[in-house]
């Protein structure tokens, strides 16, 4: 179950904005570059521009404060070179400024860098992309089952998330916690905090993001080379490319900790004990800087153009960036048009979020932040860079506000189930609002009598009316994806609206609903047994749970019994957020109950 994410949430914090030092490879005139940096720093553009209206921008420092992001580091590639690299904010509250040389955890951006090592060994004839990986694995083997009996797992499938392997991502290990061996992670054995990595669908047939697949790659590389993974990566990729600040060592050596930013959670509190340790190095363990990641990206660009073969050749680079299922290449995701293709990857570790997006033929940006809200900040910065450098993608969408009779909106007012969450529509005079359960109400604007858009995030709503003129459904379009929502009946609408109305006070007081922990505990147990009590869930939400139950039940069985549930906080939209510890892992759960006790919001991450 997923959450609707927008860039409009705001909180309060104090952040000092400071600047680092320009990277040496400046190709444009210094005054031109400085002017660009200043515009980006002073004028973060919104996701939507309205024709005829002045652009409502924000200062980067203000946005960082709203989102509780202490520091962010940025590198911009222009015409195939690092045009500038600079840090903003601080490495920790009250601490030194972020500079372009400060280390951040790259999280899942570790994967496409790992992929270069695999492809280098493939190119040299030591590995084959389409051979059964068990022929290379020595310390551990992919367990045989009904799926592997029909089709063996290959490196090509592991790199492209099509191997059918489990475990989406990894929470890491807090300071002082025991850290498992790689084989313990693969088998889900204590002290590993994630389930065993197994094949649960026929390899090569479906796409399902799997950090677990890259753990298998890590073990395979160690078995084939006989070397520790950080040494493999240093010799094959980091050293040859010149990523001099980067390392896959986990934990980061104590002597290098002063080089690293301190991670923070979404409410602006430091992660207890500092950075988590990730023995799952291939999918999540890289410590690096935006400048070093820019060097990785430029090396791929140059290899693709036949200008460098320090790690891979032009032919191998083209294979790497050839889109497969879900536009996934051999490591990075791909996108763009035929004339302007790009590759990239995002990342989110505990207290760190980052993004890399680079066009094959020139420009790009890498943004790294030391906060769980760094992804929202990164989207804003990336959009502003795209706007400044006139990229063909990622720029704000322009709309025109249409003049409509405000009473038209009365036919759309009510509650809808959009995706897995409820959204209510309301009118206040001549203004219209959309309110997603778990978030704050957001004003929407008409571009026709049945189409509306948000100014604060790049998203649109389209209503479809029935024979009586009243809307029967709404479609939310965001980030190129459509989600259809059905209108609820009057009784469900009443419960949803009441829950939303109570949310602001609940969030302000940070008061846990005394009912939610017991309901959540019972629900988790019921889902593990495959017998949820659907009468305790809002009917429309229960329908989705029925559809998702087989997959959820499998995950619950892998996680094992619930060991502890601890209340963390109340979210901005009024949901209670809990940390749930299982025998074999941890999950953050969001839950909200209606006045009659039924579950009105449910989410896992």
Image (spheres, grey):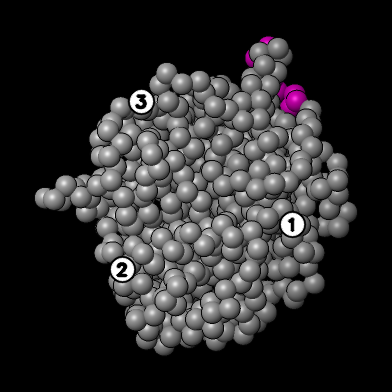
Residue drawn where x is 69% and y is 75% of the image: 180
Foreground: disc 3 or disc 2: 2
- Callout 1: few (<14), some (14-19), or many (20+) C-alpha neighbours within 10 Å? some
Give percent across and percent down for residue 236.
65, 48
Near-viewer residue (493 or 13): 493
Residue 334 falls in which quadrant of the image? top left
Compared to residue 440, the image places residue 176 above or below, namely below
Residue drawn where x is 66% and y is 33% of the image: 60
> Contact (CB < 8 A) between labels 1 and 2?
no
Q: Which residue is mark 2?
A: 491
Q: Which residue is mark 1?
A: 269
> Contact (CB < 8 A) between labels 3 and 1?
no
Q: Secondary structure at mark 2?
A: helix
Near-viewer residue (550 or 59): 59
Give percent across and percent down for residue 351.
68, 55
Q: Which residue is mark 3?
A: 400
Looking at marks 3 and 1 on the same chain, the residue that comes earlier in the sequence is marked by: 1
Q: Quadrant of the N terminus?
A: bottom left
Residue drawn where x is 65% and y is 64% of the image: 510
Compared to residue 88, the image places residue 224 above or below, namely below
Give percent across and percent down for residue 509.
65, 63
Looking at marks 1 and 2 on the same chain, the residue that comes earlier in the sequence is marked by: 1
Mark 3 and mark 1: span between their CA atoms?
40 Å
Residue bounds of the magenta highlight: 22-29
Magenta stretch: includes residue 76? no
Mark 1 and mark 2: span between their CA atoms?
40 Å
Give percent across and percent down for residue 457.
47, 39
- Callout 2: few (<14), some (14-19), or many (20+) C-alpha neighbours within 10 Å? few
- Left of 304 or right of it: where is 193? right
């Amino acid at each position: 179950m997923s959450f609707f994410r927008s860039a409009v949430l705001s909180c309060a914090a104090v952040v000092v904005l400071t600047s680092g030092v320009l990277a040496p490879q400046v190709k444009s005139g210094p005054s031109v570059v400085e002017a660009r940096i200043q515009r980006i720093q002073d004028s973060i553009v919104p996701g939507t521009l309205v024709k005829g209206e002045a652009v409502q921008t924000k200062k980067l420092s203000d946005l960082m404060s709203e989102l509780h992001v202490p520091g962010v580091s940025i590198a911009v590639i222009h015409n195939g070179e690092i045009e500038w690299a600079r840090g903003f904010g601080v490495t920790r509250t009250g601490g030194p400024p972020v500079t372009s040389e400060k280390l951040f955890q790259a999280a899942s951006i570790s994967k496409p860098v790992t992929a270069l090592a695999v492809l280098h060994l493939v190119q040299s004839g030591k590995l084959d992309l389409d051979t059964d990986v068990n022929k290379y694995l020595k310390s551990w083997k992919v367990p045989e089952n009904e799926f592997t009996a029909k089709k063996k797992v290959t490196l090509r499938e592991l790199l492209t998330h099509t191997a059918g392997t489990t475990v989406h991502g990894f929470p890491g290990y807090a300071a002082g916690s025991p850290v498992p061996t790689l084989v313990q992670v693969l088998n889900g054995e204590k002290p590993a905090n994630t389930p065993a990595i197994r094949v649960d669908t026929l390899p090569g047939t479906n796409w399902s993001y799997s950090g677990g697949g890259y753990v298998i790659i890590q073990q395979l590389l160690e078995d084939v080379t006989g070397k520790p993974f950080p040494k493999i990566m240093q010799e094959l990729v980091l050293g040859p490319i010149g990523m001099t600040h980067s390392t896959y060592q986990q934990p980061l050596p104590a002597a290098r900790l002063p080089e690293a930013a301190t991670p923070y959670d979404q409410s602006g509190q430091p992660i207890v004990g500092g950075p988590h340790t990730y023995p799952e190095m291939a999918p999540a363990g890289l410590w690096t800087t935006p400048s070093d990641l820019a060097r990785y990206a430029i090396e791929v660009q140059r290899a693709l153009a036949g200008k460098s073969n320090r790690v891979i050749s032009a032919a191998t680079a083209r294979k790497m960036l050839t889109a497969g299922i879900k536009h996934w290449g051999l490591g990075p995701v791909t996108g763009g048009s035929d004339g302007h293709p790009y590759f990239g990857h995002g990342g989110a570790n505990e207290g760190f979020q980052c993004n890399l997006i680079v066009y094959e033929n020139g420009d790009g940006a890498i943004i790294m932040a030391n906060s769980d809200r760094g992804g929202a900040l990164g989207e804003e910065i990336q959009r502003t860079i795209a706007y400044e450098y006139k990229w063909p993608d990622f720029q704000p969408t322009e709309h025109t506000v249409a003049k409509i009779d405000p009473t038209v909106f009365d036919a759309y007012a009510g509650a809808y189930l959009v995706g897995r969450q409820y959204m209510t529509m309301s009118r206040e005079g001549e203004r219209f609002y959309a309110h997603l359960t778990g978030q704050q109400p957001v004003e929407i604007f008409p571009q026709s009598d049945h189409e509306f858009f948000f100014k604060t995030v790049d998203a649109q709503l389209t209503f479809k009316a029935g024979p009586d003129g009243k809307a029967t459904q709404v479609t939310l379009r965001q980030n190129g994806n459509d989600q259809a929502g059905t209108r609820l009946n009057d009784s469900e609408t009443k419960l949803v609206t009441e829950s939303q109305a109570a949310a602001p006070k609940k969030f302000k007081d940070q008061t846990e609903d005394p009912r939610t922990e017991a309901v959540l505990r019972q629900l988790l147990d019921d889902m593990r047994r495959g017998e949820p009590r659907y009468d305790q869930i809002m009917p429309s939400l229960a329908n989705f749970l029925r559809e998702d139950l087989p997959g959820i039940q499998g995950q619950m069985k892998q996680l094992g019994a619930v060991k502890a549930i601890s209340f963390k906080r109340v979210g901005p939209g009024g949901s209670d957020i809990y940390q749930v510890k299982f025998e074999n892992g941890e999950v953050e759960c969001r839950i909200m109950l209606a006045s009659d006790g039924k579950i009105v919001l449910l989410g896992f991450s």
